[in-house]
Amino acid sequence: MKSIISLVLRYIPRPYLQLVGHWAARGLSIFYIGNKVECPVCNSKYRKFLPYGRNTSSRENALCPSCLSLERHRLMALYMKRKTNFYTANLKVLHVAPEYCFIDRFEQMKNLDYITADIESPLAKVKMDIHQIPFPENTFDVAICNHVMEHVDDYILAMSELHRVLKPGGWALIQSPQDMKYEVTYEDPTITDPKEREIHFLQNDHLRLFGRNYGRELEKGGFKVTEDRFVMDELSKAEVLRYSLPGEEIVYFCQK
């Protein structure tokens, strides 16, 4: 199963996967019937989640067959439910590079004025380059932008644009892949070969790999950043296993 998923992720363009991937995953769900793990995004239960990853070292127990949430999405759902006003307050929300597992659910929430945006995703309603967000300053209460900053040419400009369109007092979740062995962000513009980028930056479409300084990089965009060790400090081991969460991921809560 891992080999099949790896081949699909590596060779089928992402826009196509976003349109049809959920049908394939749901077809596989019959083989995962059980009650050992639970998805806090869609509330589905399985004996385990599907593996996920672009190479043979892909992660076990990662992808929810029902909604396609990954570990980071399940973490975000729990964090927003338990530590923010996302599910209770009337909010205008900008979701950049929206994930399939969230779109329908957030669109149905009566308290949200919810806008999706991306430069290429067929799932987003607004076609948008994050370097030049086409909304006035002080427009949104919340911005969600996960696993984008490793792809863009100028991530400080992209962070600044998210900060610009937030209202004073607004907040954002801006997660990115990190390698904690690096003190600072690892970036080398001379590495242009896709195979080399995959070796150095985890994926062939990544331009950098953030290190332990990621919170300080977000601050360069204008944010006040709280590095919240929510999984490590507030969740039980049983919850981490039940929801299959990234056990050492820091949540970067960004405020204007």
Image (cartoon, helix red, strand yellow):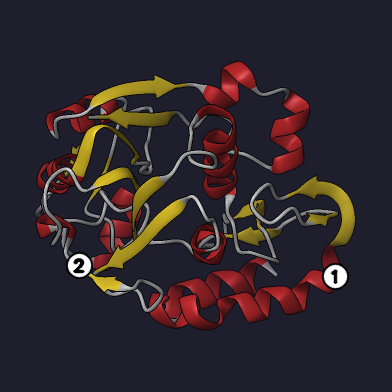
* Residue occupying the far top of the picture: 233
* Residue occupying the far right of the picture: 34
Give the image location of residue 24, x and y in percent.
Answer: 66, 80
Give the image location of residue 27, x and y in percent.
Answer: 75, 79
Three-letter code, disc 1: Phe
Q: Residues within 10 Å of mark 1 (few under 14, many from 20)?
A: few
Q: Give the residue at mark 1.
A: 31
Q: Is residue 157 above or below residue 196?
A: above
Give the image location of residue 89, x and y in percent.
Answer: 47, 39
Depth order, front residue of 29/132: 132
To which quarter of the image does residue 160 belong? Answer: top left
User: In terms of sequence position, does the residue under pointer 2 or pointer 1 come before the other?
Assistant: 1
Q: Is residue 199 visible?
A: yes
Depth order, front residue of 107/216: 107
Q: Is 84 placed left or right of 130 in the picture?
A: right
Give the image location of residue 10, x and y in percent.
Answer: 45, 73
To which quarter of the image does residue 141 belong? Answer: top left
